[in-house]
């Protein structure tokens, strides 16, 4: 077991620079002695993937009659410095034995041949039991006397119901306890704003601190721990193996979010919506930043539906200087809210976004001191959709030339359909809008009529006899996991040949049922990835002021799981 690894989160001076190494710590439950070999194997794999520390969750193992021997083996063979934790039931663990037994196991661990780098104990238990305090101090002192590396104490507190009312005094208690080397607070976040408070608490720590919010709203605290100087962040070995709600995997952190590259000056971007957990954005934009050598990270930023939660959360992100928030992609259900927020804050708003009545991109320009220097609101969906369709119609001509005068059926009347229709009208195409609910397509036509030739398709059957150059699906029909995953919006009797382009905005899967049928009938097809890539590239350019390398984003999506698609 390596003995001289950095202890992480320790503020140490290198020359005149304060260096804080935030550790990526894999947390592993070990339930029974028979599980020890596999647990060591999983830990070794996590270390190979980028973990620098292991937390052994011994709650259940410690209750086994042969548990102590198994624990000693885990500690001896741990592939990285480790934390030993026997978490009590009242703080989210499964240990329900008596406190005396827990104390004697911790004492045995600390005074054994292979003491862990850290023992984690709840602040509540520490404050309750003088006996426990004495025994843990003995274990720590023993290790310090006989080893070249001492065991240290993490005092922790966990709240699964939300932010505890006495959070600040708990942190002060941890700071005031001499034996406590690292303070840890973890609570269930109810919104992203809880994460913002946690960033400040960690950044203003008086001793090394782990500050993590649990649940989907807490993910930013786990990813951004290095930005604020957190001691460590916990991660799971695999999906489904998390030891706390909202824990990402080691690979997510190390590969998708480039955890080891994040530092105090890293600029933060994200995808705002609800839900956002399955967005392709983090995978695509983080690799885009890496390829361009830009110190930035892109994270999921779930914001509950409703104007008030959107306004409050994004407003706080913009104002939070430490966060270095550079902007975001905005998706359902907040695209209209973004436009409204832009108007309220006096942002520069792209005319196409105004025309569509919705936006998907916020750019926050900052000066060298981090103060907000300007806000811009864009809709990159519209231009992306038209560019993708134009490439399918005629790749050898400009977007305007390829699209002008073409008759296009847009199916759907939601935000994407509006963006597609507005983008097409801006290039003088003729648009007919078809939708399941007629009043919604009428509203789209009413709102866009002054900008070009647009009309309502009276019935879906008209799709088959409208003599269209192109069809664009802007509904979720065909989307994997959706309610109409196996369906196509095009009528069965629609005649197609290779003079017609069929485009889907759905990009999961790439080859939707509609595209498969269209291809089989001889039409040219454009899958939703083309639009996704084009809108993401436009966002990258808006945030960084530089275009992505040609083909870079498209290359990032090639070989995506389940991809069997192709584009015209
Ligand atoms: P939205 O605002 O919720 O609108 C959805 C539209 O689809 C509505 O007009 C709805 O009709 C219609 N619809 C829903 N289910 C239907 C069904 N089973 N049969 C027929 N029509 C149905 O959604 P949006 O924001 O416009 O997004 C639409 C799709 O665009 C998304 O599902 C996503 O796959 C795709 N998208 C792609 C990209 C990209 O970059 N490629 C980006 C964003 C979105 P009603 O009015 O009758 O409810």
Image: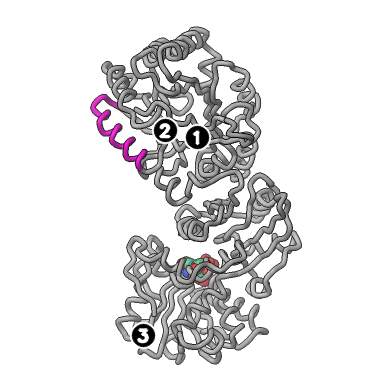
Residue 299: horizontal and vertical position, in percent?
53, 51
Element type where label 1 sits in the image: strand
Residue 214 in the image: above or below residue 182: below
Residue ranking furthest to the front: 15
Going from N to C along the chain, the mark reached first, 1 or 2, is 2
Q: CA distance from mark 2 to mark 3?
A: 55 Å
Mark carried by residue 53: 2
Q: CA distance from mark 1 to mark 3?
A: 54 Å
Please name the residue that numbered disc 3 is placed on: 523
Left or right, residue 391 beside residue 68 = right
Instruction: Out of 75 and 277, give the one closest to the viewer.
Output: 75
Are the residues at dot 1 and dot 2 in contact (C-beta closer than 8 Å)? yes
Residue 394 in the image: above or below residue 248: below
Q: Which residues are magenta?
A: 31-48
Residue 57: horizontal and vertical position, in percent?
38, 28
Going from N to C along the chain, the mark reached first, 1 or 3, is 1
Q: Is residue 364 visible?
A: yes
Q: Is residue 186 visible?
A: no
Residue 465: quadrant of the picture: bottom left
Q: Quadrant of the N terminus?
A: top left
Please name the residue that numbered disc 1 is placed on: 232
Badge 1: residue crowd in 10 Å (few <14, some 14–19, many ≥20): many
Q: Quadrant of the C terminus?
A: bottom left
């Amino acid at each position: 077991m390596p003995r001289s690894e950095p202890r992480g989160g320790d503020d140490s001076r290198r020359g005149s620079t304060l260096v804080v190494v935030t550790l990526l710590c894999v947390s592993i439950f070990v339930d029974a002695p028979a599980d020890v070999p596999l647990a060591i194997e999983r830990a070794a794999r996590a270390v190979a993937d980028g973990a620098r520390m292991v937390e052994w969750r011994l709650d259940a193992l410690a209750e086994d009659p042969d548990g102590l021997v198994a624990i000693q083996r885990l500690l001896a063979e741990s592939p990285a410095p480790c934390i030993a934790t026997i978490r009590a039931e009242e703080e989210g663990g499964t240990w329900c034995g008596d406190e005396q037994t827990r104390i004697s196991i911790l004492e045995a661990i600390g005074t054994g041949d292979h003491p862990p780098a850290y023992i984690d104990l709840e602040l509540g238990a520490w404050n309750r039991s003088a006996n426990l305090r004495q025994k843990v101090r003995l274990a720590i002192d023993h290790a310090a006397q006989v080893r070249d590396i001492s065991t240290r104490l993490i005092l922790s507190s966990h709240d699964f119901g939300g932010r505890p009312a006495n959070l600040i005094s708990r942190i002060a208690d941890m700071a005031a306890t001499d034996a406590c080397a690292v303070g840890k607070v973890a609570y269930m976040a109810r919104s992203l704003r809880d994460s913002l408070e946690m960033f400040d608490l960690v950044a203003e720590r008086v001793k090394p601190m782990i500050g993590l919010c649990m649940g989907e709203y807490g993910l930013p605290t786990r990813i951004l721990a290095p930005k604020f100087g957190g001691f460590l962040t916990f991660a799971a070995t695999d999906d489904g193996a998390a030891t706390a709600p909202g824990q990402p995997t080691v690979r997510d952190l190390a590969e998708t979010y480039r955890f080891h590259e994040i530092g105090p000056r890293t600029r933060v971007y994200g995808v705002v919506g609800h839900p956002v957990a399955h967005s392709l954005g983090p995978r695509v934009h983080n690799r885009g930043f890496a390829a361009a050598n830009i110190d930035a990270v892109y994270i999921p930023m779930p914001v509950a539906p409703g104007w008030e939660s959107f306004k409050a959360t994004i407003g706080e992100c913009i104002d939070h200087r430490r966060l270095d928030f550079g902007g975001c992609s905005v998706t359902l259900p907040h695209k209209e809210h973004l436009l409204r927020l832009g108007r309220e804050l006096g942002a520069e708003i792209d005319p196409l976004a105004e025309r569509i009545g919705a936006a998907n991109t916020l750019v926050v320009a900052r000066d060298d001191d981090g103060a907000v220097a300007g806000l811009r609101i864009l809709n990159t969906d519209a231009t992306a959709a038209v560019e993708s369709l134009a490439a399918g119609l005629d790749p050898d001509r400009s977007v305007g030339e390829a699209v002008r005068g073409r008759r296009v059926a847009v199916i759907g009347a939601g935000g994407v359909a509006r963006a597609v229709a507005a983008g097409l009208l801006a290039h003088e195409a003729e648009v007919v809008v078809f939708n399941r609910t007629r009043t919604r397509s009428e509203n789209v036509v009413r709102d866009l009529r002054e900008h070009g030739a647009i009309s309502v398709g009276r019935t879906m059957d008209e799709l088959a006899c409208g003599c269209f150059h192109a069809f664009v699906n802007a509904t979720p029909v065909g989307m994997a996991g959706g309610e109409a995953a196996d369906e196509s919006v095009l009528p069965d009797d629609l005649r197609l040949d290779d003079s017609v382009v069929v485009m889907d905005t759905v990009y999961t899967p790439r080859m939707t049922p509609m595209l498969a049928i269209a291809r089989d009938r001889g039409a040219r097809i454009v899958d939703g990835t083309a639009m996704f890539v084009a809108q993401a590239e436009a966002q990258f350019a808006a945030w960084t002021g530089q275009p992505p390398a040609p083909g870079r984003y498209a290359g990032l999506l090639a070989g995506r799981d389940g991809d069997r698609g192709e584009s015209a």
